[in-house]
Amino acid sequence: MRRHVPLTLLLAPLLVTACTTDPAAPAAGSSAPTTTPSPTAPAVDYTVWQAGRSTPVADKIYPARGTAALDVLHYDLALDWAPATKTLTGTATLRIRPTKDAPALVLDFMPYQVDGVTLDDTTVTGTVAKEKLTVNAPVVADKPVTLVVKYHGKPKTTPMPSHRKDVEDLGLTLTKEGGLWTMQEPFGAFTWYPANDQPSDEALYDIRVTVPAGWSAIASGTPAGQSGTTFTYRSADPVATYLTTLAVGKYQKLTAKGPRGIPLTFWYRKGADDKLLPYLKKSPQYLAWLEKKFGPYPFPSGGVVVVDSASGMETQQMITMGRKIENTKARRDRWGSDLLHEYAHQWFGDSVTPTTWTDLWLNEGWAQYAQDLYTKDTLHLSDASLDRYLRDADAASRKKLGPPGKPNPKNFAEGNVYLCPEAMLHEIHRKLGDKAFFALARAWVQEQRNTQQDRASFIAFVNKQTGRDFTKLINTWLDSKTTPKSITVA
């Protein structure tokens, strides 16, 4: 996830370094209704998108985002970006399984000009207000529908509910040269397409982006070809909305092969990002280390796009990394370590996704622990130094932010959901030993692949996998206001 708590085994003391509008058209944000269906509407085989089926859960941390009333199976996004006018034009086709009978469909969506809405080839009314698109047509539980929304406008961002030093507004962001980039955790996908913008509703994606000559478009998923200036990406593994990405700019492209021949693609700005190339080129090394610990990389391709941000984000198959770093070797080394953190998220958070934002710790604890174990291995740090660092960092984080299992909505992704669950995992590691701990980690991500999980399912898995009862230890580490003392595990 957008990482970056000031640490990385910044074991500081331990490292010592290291359009024209028709006047008769509907008002902005709505489409004209009609009830005339297409007489030749073909039957749609929704089974081809079964891999995108989820069981959406209402999110208690950010209840205004997303809904449990629908399950998006597949997003097809056809986008066109015009830098000169800063206009995004889109046609979003959503294959949706309603989870209950309802008089309307409601999705998260930025107030773009809506140019037309159809539901199963029938033109319907679509109104945008308060960052919600309401499609006024009844739906029936478990009877899938196809929603098509045509829209255009200038992208806008939405505030980030956090006090982090690297905080930026969320969603589709304009660059000085007329390009685009986005980071959108815990929400913000709705700033560029209509979405059920919450983690429990994962879906399959096809994304096509047309840009002017000389520009490149990068998105999450597997590269699926380029025709003229239209770039295509496809996700055959389900993706949570916060893990999608889009970037447009005058990029250079670099390719490589990861472990077992995994194709990797890196997008960077010549000149601006030259000093980061050595770390991008270390990606095969990072992935090899992660595969050794956690088993095979879970997707058919990977890559990185460098953008005008101060942070980083584990967007699925195409990591989004900010280029804003201090121009020192130490800071660039930290950038490389942070990149490994985002790669670790491809297992923890992307392939295995939290059901709600209450369990963000389940992403960040594992990714942070992987990052710090990598630092420990490569810098040959002692076990004792890691022990001291984690207990001190845990105590400071709990005192400032509270326990990780009860996150404050105003403090999204701050230090406690990284450091405290990391310390908990370290404690489990100490009790199990290397062999059993990494067997547990591999089994968790490999057996739960492409699913949504929570605290209860994690505890049940740990107990079953180890044959021991870690319930008290895990609950205490997630809920205690102070750093737990040693807890006996039966």
Image (tube, rainbow, N blue to C red):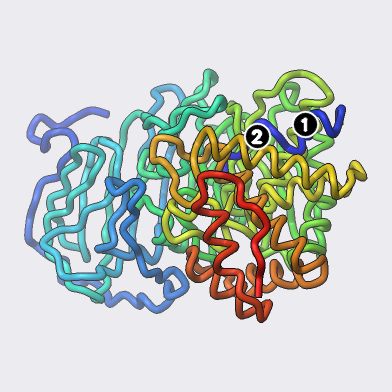
Relative to 213, residue 208 above or below: below
The quarter holding residue 156 reads: top left
Do residues under tags 1 and 2 come within 8 Å of each other at their CB atoms?
A: yes
Q: Nearer the viewer, residue 187 or 472?
A: 472
Residue 288 in picture, x, y percent from top left:
82, 58
The quarter holding residue 445 reads: bottom right
Label 1 and label 2: CA atoms lie apart by 9 Å
Badge 2 amino acid: Val
Q: Residue at x 58, y 31 (%)?
A: 249
Relative to 490, residue 422 above or below: above
Q: In the drawing, does residue 76 fall left or right of residue 297?
A: left
Q: In the drawing, does residue 154 fall left or right of residue 289?
A: left
Residue 476 in view of the camera: yes
Mark 1, Cα crowd under 10 Å, few <14 / some 14-19 / many 20+, is some
Q: Nearer the viewer, residue 335 or 114?
A: 335
Outermost residue to the right? 380
Q: Nearer the viewer, residue 261 or 15?
A: 15
Relative to 178, residue 357 above or below: below
Residue under pointer 1: 276
Mark 2, Cα crowd under 10 Å, few <14 / some 14-19 / many 20+, is many
The quarter holding residue 55 reads: bottom left
Residue 298 in picture, x, y percent from top left:
66, 65
Q: In the drawing, does residue 373 fall left or right of residue 365?
A: right
Quadrant of the image for the N terminus?
top right
Badge 1 amino acid: Leu
Q: Residue at x 58, y 74 (%)?
A: 461
Q: Residue at x 10, y 46 (%)?
A: 32
Return the mark for residue 306: 2
Say whether disc 1 or disc 2 marks the residue closer to the N-terminus: 1
